[in-house]
Amino acid sequence: MTPPQEPGPAVPLFDVAGKSVVVTGGTRGIGLMIARGFLQAGARVIISSRKAQACERARDALSDSGDVSAVAADLSTAGGVETLSRFVADEFDRVDVLVNNAGATWGAPVDEFPQSGFDKILNLNITSVFEVTQALLPMLRAAASDGPARVINIGSIDGIVVSHTDNFSYGASKAAVHMLTRKLAATLAPEQITVNAIAPGPFPSKMTAFMLDDPDMRSRVEAGVPLGRVGTPDDIAGTAIFLSSRAGAYLTGVVIPVDGGMSGTR
């Protein structure tokens, strides 16, 4: 396959204006940060979440930043994946960027960890990543004719280093996300679709609230980060925008830790 022509010099290196972006789990935490970053950079964004009220609140909160739509879809089910893909097809003629961010965690001591704690987490955190990507492939292929289409999977440093919490299925699922990223990257590269992953460290979210909302625990978390702080919206959105822009067009199959040095210095 002949690669598409490189954009001319007039196109800014980190420009994502006009791109059609889908962010799953985009109503809170890292997903909301990424969605807002793309909107502020001029992209059109669809966010999804399991709960309709959460979608409405997030859409209202983001509407001042740009062109945003929202759809309620439980991506742990085949019906939810179909709902998302149909909504996207109604709103967009192509998908330039898919951010697979929807996920969950489960914590319990090793002797008490239930099978449901594995089934639920693996289904949402890894199986749905594949199924959503698969469902949106026709629209990613449509975008690839003008330059690489992008898939960005949100992994975790818990898929790289061993966590201190009892999140047995979460860490395993995120390690699987990283390997799935590499496999999809190898498979889809000939079609000019790049697939990369971001592995965040500690960022403010519902998932990390038990640590970061407590001043003492937050101080301990920050002390464990070489750069001495938790992540900000600019940190995570900036990485996603880089991977989606002309600047990131030659990267595929990589996992980028955005963790203040936690995984790279251990």
Image (cartoon, grey):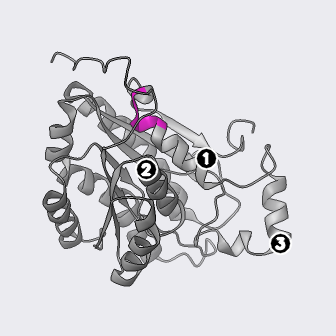
The residue to which callout 2 is attached is 38
- Indicate the position of residue 25 as horizontal and vertical percent values: 41, 65
Give the residue at x 79% y 66%. Answer: 218
The reply to whether the C-beta atoms of the residues labelled 1 and 3 are less than 8 Å apart is no
The reply to whether the C-beta atoms of the residues labelled 3 and 2 are less than 8 Å apart is no
The total number of labels drawn is 3
Instruction: Inspect the image, locate mark 2, and give the three-letter code of the amino acid beneath it.
Output: Phe
The range drawn in magenta is: 242-246
- Indicate the position of residue 69 as horizontal and vertical percent values: 30, 66
Say which quarter of the image contains residue 211. bottom right
Instruction: Inspect the image, locate mark 3, and give the three-letter code of the amino acid beneath it.
Output: Pro
- Report the magenta stretch's main SS: helix
Say which quarter of the image contains residue 144. top left
The residue to which callout 3 is attached is 215
Instruction: Inspect the image, locate mark 1, and give the three-letter code of the amino acid beneath it.
Output: Asp
- Compare residues 81 and 234 and report the one nearer the observer: 234
Q: CA distance from mark 3 to mark 2?
A: 31 Å
The residue to which callout 1 is attached is 235
Say which quarter of the image contains residue 54. bottom left
